[in-house]
Amino acid sequence: MSKKSGSRPCETEVPVDASIIRIPPHHYIHVLDQNSNIARVEIGPQTYYRQDNERVLFAPVRMVMVPPRHYCVVVNPVACDDNGRVLFDGSGQAKLRHADLEIRLTRDPFPLHPGEEIQQDVTPLQVVYPNTALRLQALLDFLDGGEKRVAGDEWLFEGPGTYIPRKEAVVLETIKATVIGENQAIRLRARKEGVDRGGVRRVTGEEWLVSKVGAYLPGAHEEVIDIVNAFILTDKKALHVRALRPFRDAGGHDRRTGEEWLVTLDDREAHVPSVAEEVVGVVHVTTLSTRQYCVVLDPVGPDGKPQLGQKRVVKGERSFFLQPGELLERGIQDVFVLSEEEGLVLRAIEPFTDTQEDAALVVLPQSPKRKRAAQREEAEPEQEEQGEPERSKRRRHGAVLRRPGDRWMLRGPIEYVPPSQVEVVLRRQAIPLDENEGIYVRDIKSGKVRAVIGQTYMLTQDEELWPKELPANVEALLASPRDPLADRSDHRRASEEGRAAPRDKTQVVSFRVPHNAAVQVYDYREKRARVVFGPERVMLGPDEQFTVLSLSGDRPKRGNVIKAVCLLLGPDFFTDIITIETADHARLQLQLSYNWHFDVKPPVDPAEAAALFSVPDFVGDACKAIASRVRGAVASVQFDDFHKNSNRIICSAVFGFDEKLAVRPSLRFHQNRLVISSVDIQSVEPVDQRTRDALQKSVQLAIEITTNSQEAAARRPSWSGWPRLASRS
């Protein structure tokens, strides 16, 4: 047998095969009788004489000594009687309790009999401190101080104390108490069915809270899940809570699964959520000043249930918490404070009786305009309900009946908070207009458009600004900074000039007609035109448009060069280049300039004024007519004759002859009262080379004839009889 744990050999090693073995005090040896094959214990102090049939199994070893507050565990211990003596069988072998354990505490030193083993060496006993416990589990059925323990049972050994081990129980873990402070609680869960420390029956998996301040030592069938801190509630913070299962809360209210509510300072100062509650979040207070309000969607009713689809208007000065499920429609809004020149267009979304308007009108002092309007309204006779389909929403008995979709306007000065049945469509501002300013207003009910000019005007609830569209060429002419008088011929720079700011299409279109000019405006609704003579300012109505003149320009004239709105009455001139051919087929290019004006004298008859615009391109038409006359007259004369009498031929062709066969002083176009007063021949140039050579020869010949005539005159003696030399001097 090998040396056992916990023993050590004596100081003097003795061979096991020696005949004489000295065993010191508190030592022992095992001797095997080889005849009977039985081992026994020999305890010192003694001198042992070994027989021939005996064998010492190991040298003397020290006995097992268990000091105070220590223990050891022995496997296969020997059986003892009531007096503690070892029992032997008939052959002298010590009886063993096989597969058994024995916890040996403080006692006299003892040897280990053959077959005994030390499973756990000498170990100090475990001290259990206060607020600490050992969780024990029974391995066998036994009685523990009169209480029956069944295998598998668990219980606690609570401190302070010293735990004495037992072979029937095993230590699973050491449990420390959890300290619960102020505004704290611990969350416990039951491992198995039983009774907690408060005497409440718990089922497996059940959870609960313990909030008593101090150290809490969980029971054998309890486990600590978490430490729950309380939420501190103030007048600016509340707690949004949801129920996880049906239960009764701390306030004594029965809650159902999924129900949500708020815990505020009025309920308690600190709230510890129970195991049946779920904290959704912290809700901050909503504060409204005296000039603020808000609209709450799905408000909570007196029964604590949300009224889905409804609204509630909350006015300041006030502080409140939004209940679960409530939302602010547009956040915190400012109260509408309207001046005398402001108004609100409102629309009813639900039927209701409007009493807020009358009450609000008394809040602020009424302006003279409002007083006059109120007096006119009071002067109107009240009609019966059956005969007033259009006034069914008027005042009745101090209230105003509103139907869904009704629109009305509220004018200042006023402080207004719209009720939940009213929607603010827009805020109107009075538009100040000078006598030369205006706006286009459209009635959204009838569609009629009118112009409002020269007054401060506020659109009503049934009106809107109407944008007047103009053709692109008219827009360009109105936006052009060119003066129609000073820059009338500078049409080449029209495309190069900078664009002005875009026109406000809702403002009345106006145009300044310069002096000695006219503008035609056509009304498409009335099917009539009117002509405005300058200096004047033209303001277009909703259905009126300018008559745009498209005049010819350049040299020679070509169409659609000059675009203009106003027609200049002259006097003025235009220049044209025409090509003519004489009877002898000499082609010449003439540059002619014509002075013109319109024969219009105030007062002008409307028919005569309309005749001014009867010819859209009076320049091109006049040039074509004059060119035709000139070509016809020149075609019947020879080149030499035309060269000598060009002015007479052209003037007679353009103006014609009167009854006395005298050249008329002017040419009149009766269609549009245009008068050509004079014709100026600025240049005459031949077109082909042959005509140019003939003209050059004719000119040279004329020069020679003139020179010769002058020389002949010089050679003739003077009438005074002086010699030629003297005349030259």
Image (tube, grey):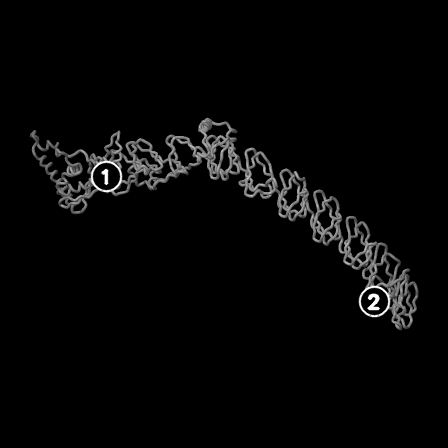
Circle 1 — which element?
strand
Which residue occupies the foreground of this view, 541 or 373?
373
Q: Amino acid at mark 2?
A: Ser
Asked whether residue 401 appears in the rendered view, the answer is yes
For the point 86% across and 54% down, which residue is it? 68
How far across and how far down the image is residue 385, in percent? 46, 34
Alpha carbon distance from label 1 to label 2: 145 Å
Judging by the rendered image, the residue that carries numbered circle 2 is 2
Q: Is residue 501 above or below residue 256?
A: above
Q: Quadrant of the C terminus?
A: top left
Q: Is residue 242 above or below residue 675?
A: below
Q: Quadrant of residue 46?
A: bottom right
Asked whether residue 487 appears in the rendered view, the answer is no
Which residue occupies the foreground of this view, 51 or 425?
425
Judging by the rendered image, the residue that carries numbered circle 1 is 575
How far across and how far down the image is residue 53, in percent? 90, 72
